[in-house]
Amino acid sequence: MTEEVNFEQLNLPISDYLKTYSLDEQREIFEYLSEMDEINRKAYNIAYDHLKSSFNIVRSNGFKEWKHSKSKSK
């Protein structure tokens, strides 16, 4: 049985390219998206809507900052 992350429960638009990432990376992206506050969710939706398929959550400033602060807290 193949394990996968259920991004649909986040109620956010998600690109199919996320399925190309490793399971660990998908989990990390899911964690980031699930922790976003309402303002960041709106910003995410706008960025996704404007950039469409060229939007990459891993390259976004918000994700990079979140990952950096997460690694500092360990």
Image (cartoon, helix red, strand yellow):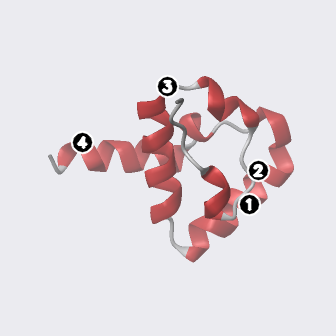
> Considering only vertical position in the picture, is 37 above or below 57?
below
> Considering only vertical position in the picture, is 13 above or below 67?
below
Which label was assigned to residue 48?
2
Q: Amino acid at mark 4?
A: Ser
Question: What residue is rendered at 64% in x and 34% in y?
Answer: 18
> Considering only vertical position in the picture, is 71 above or below 41?
above
Q: Are marks 2 and 1 in contact (CB under 8 Å)?
A: yes
Pair 4/3: label in front = 3
Residue 13: which quarter of the image? bottom right
Tag 1 secondary structure: helix
Tag 2 secondary structure: helix
Which label was assigned to residue 45?
1
| Residue that badge 3 annotates | 22
| Residue that badge 4 annotates | 71
Q: CA distance from mark 4 to mark 2?
A: 26 Å
Residue 56 placement, left or right of 68: right
> Considering only vertical position in the picture, is 60 above or below 36?
above
